[in-house]
Image: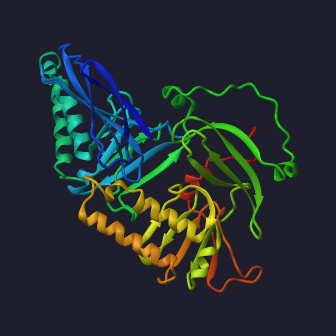
Amino acid sequence: MSVIAEENVRGGSVFKEINADDEDSQPTEIESLCMNCYQNGMTRILLTKIPFFKEIIISSFTCPNCSWSNTEIQSAGRIQDQGITYTLNVKSKQDMNREVVKADSATTRIPELDFEIPPYTQKGSLSTIEGLLDRAVAGLEQDQPLRNETAPEVAVKISEFIDKLKKLKEGESGFTLVIDDPSGNSFVENPFAPQKDEALSFCNYTRTPQQDAQLGIKAEDEEEEEKPSNDIDTMRNEVLTFNTNCPECNAPASTNMKLVQIPHFKEVIIMATNCDDCGHRTNEVKSGGATEELGTKITLHLTDVSDMSRDLLKSETCSILIPELEFELGMAAVGGKFTTLEGILKDIKDLIVSKNPFTCGDSSTSDRTEKLKLFGQKIDKIMAGDMDVHIVLDDPAGNSYLQNIYAPDPDPEMTTEKYTRTFEQNEDLGLNDMKTEGYQE
């Protein structure tokens, strides 16, 4: 992903390409009008990456004439397919240092204080938990002198509330921070990555029509188009193609879709997108059937390097665990894939180590870099067959698969467990509110 910014050079214009993968990338400076004193100031723009998140654009404006300054962040990508809600239990002073990307469409809540910052009342920001509280306190204190003159009772109540926020910032008591962003472009840091953070949880959800309207997404035409043939045999024997946009450069691209039968399992839909403009390629696998009545947990004991060639289908609802490394990859982190066991381990290594900007440049720390490199070396040992580990595929929807090379006989090194989903798992899959019988009543 690149952004073309304009620099003024001796009355002319030079276009400079900014790339988030460039370790030596410097902010681009643009002379801009100050909206406070209406004289010229300087805007600095930098495209950067947030680890385990995505690319963002950070802009900062300063005016040397009136000393007014302003900072803002914008997502460098598109609006995501689903909204996201982060819930963080802040228990210690260290939690106040977590990085937070808050888009302007996000709602921030602290339930213990019944406090809420509505969407579009603040510009997007890259800050910390402490910075969010400081910004909230500064916003409430801004008009306090006027309130003391016009509404003293209101001013007293707001002062008491400001004191509560300051106590939370000092770590005198724990609280819950909720960030709800329909655009899916907000983020809360997990300092324990790649391990799971017990204090932080997130869930994706489908936006309502009202939220789509707030984001400026055009509603789909309600008029029904001519329906293509839905003959299953026809779909099995042909590759369907439909137009879409590239997720990297947003240029027009085409996606191919094919229905495939996996032996001893079920039918799946394989989707592949190829962009002719930037060369980006991606593939995704979705289940061709319904959600199973029971969840599936597959555990494989790796005893030989030949296990790396086993076919593996990971649905978007499946999480991957390696107990010996205390590692857990949550659902939707890699997406749906039809690959081999070696292929999924390479994807995990690329996600955690190779494509992590915190392992190089000014953002890196020696402890974090060494920790991630050690994790990558352990993944290499697993792929080489030099480490005795178990691979666990846990799919509440029951739509994941790991090849049994002894089929139709049982595999002595692999166990498959069916289990009843919890209420929370059904909630994540959207099954609790789904009504399939008598829905017309």
Q: How many marks?
A: 0
Left of 155 or right of it: where is 105?
A: right
67 lies above or below 169? above
Q: Residue at x 62, y 47 (%)?
A: 433
Q: Residue at x 16, y 32 (%)?
A: 159
Instruction: Give percent across and percent down for residue 173.
Output: 22, 53
Instruction: Give percent across and percent down for residue 190.
Output: 35, 56
Q: Nearer the viewer, residue 146 or 185?
A: 185
Q: Quadrant of residue 375?
A: bottom left
Colouring convention used in this rendered image of the protein: rainbow
Q: Quadrant of residue 137?
A: top left
Image quadrant occupied by the C terminus = top right
Image quadrant occupied by the N terminus = top left
352 lies above or below 437? below
Q: Residue at x 75, y 65 (%)?
A: 262
Instruction: Give percent across and percent down for residue 21.
Output: 38, 48
276 lies above or below 174? above
Residue furthest top as drawn:
38
Instruction: Give percent across and percent down for residue 18.
Output: 36, 38
Q: Nearer the viewer, residue 34 or 188?
A: 34
Q: Nearer the viewer, residue 348 or 140?
A: 348
Q: Residue at x 19, y 46 (%)?
A: 169
Left of 47 or right of it: where is 397?
A: right
